[in-house]
Amino acid sequence: MKSKMILISALLFLCCAFVLPAEEVPANQELREQLKEALKIGQSMREIERNAIKNDPELKALSEEMKSLNMKMREKLNSKLSDNPEYMELKRKNEEMKKEWKNRRFEGKKNAPPGMEKPGERRRKFE
């Protein structure tokens, strides 16, 4: 009787161990699909915004002014934080991680996706 109870509890444990993780996969897949959809929506919105800025002289002027101000702020911020060792170490690590991700991005693929000859090319095209 005792051995049957142990066997039943062991089987129940194994069933739970294998069934519960299997149920999480569809939820994870659903979340991944939602994320993809959100990214597509964001890309479409940015494309529409770019076109609106390109076609409206006032928006175009504001955009150029924002770019200029952002560049000035970046320069001042970089000069101010160049003496901060913690910031510089974090910046170095961040740049290393970006390089690693870019190298891994097309690893094993013969050709980049259409419109992207090399990593970062698409981003430069819109600037």
Image (cartoon, rainbow, N blue to C red):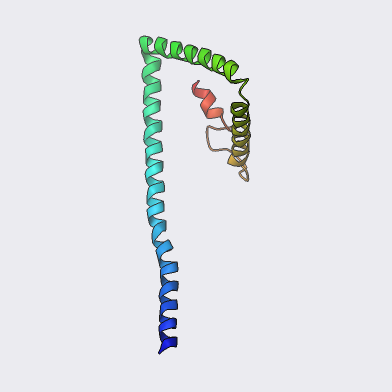
Taking 90 as reference, is 44 left or right?
left
The x and y percentages for residue 112 are 57, 38
Which residue is at 63% across, 30% downward?
89
In terms of depth relative to the viewer, which is nearer, 21 or 32?
21
In terms of depth relative to the viewer, which is nearer, 84 or 77?
84
Which residue is at 60% across, 36% downward?
97
Look at the picture and state if 94 lies above or below 65.
Answer: below
Look at the picture and state if 13 lies above or below 47.
Answer: below
Q: Quadrant of residue 98?
A: top right
Which residue is at 43% across, 73% downward?
13
Taking 9 as reference, is 82 left or right?
right
Total of numbered circles in the picture?
0
Q: Quadrant of residue 7?
A: bottom left
Taking 3 as reference, is 79 left or right?
right
Q: Quadrant of residue 26?
A: bottom left
In the picture as drawn, the residue positioned furthest to the bottom comes out as 1
Q: Can you say which quadrant of the picture contains the N terminus? A: bottom left
The x and y percentages for residue 55 are 37, 15
In terms of depth relative to the viewer, which is nearer, 65 or 116?
65
Look at the picture and state if 38 lies above or below 92.
Answer: below
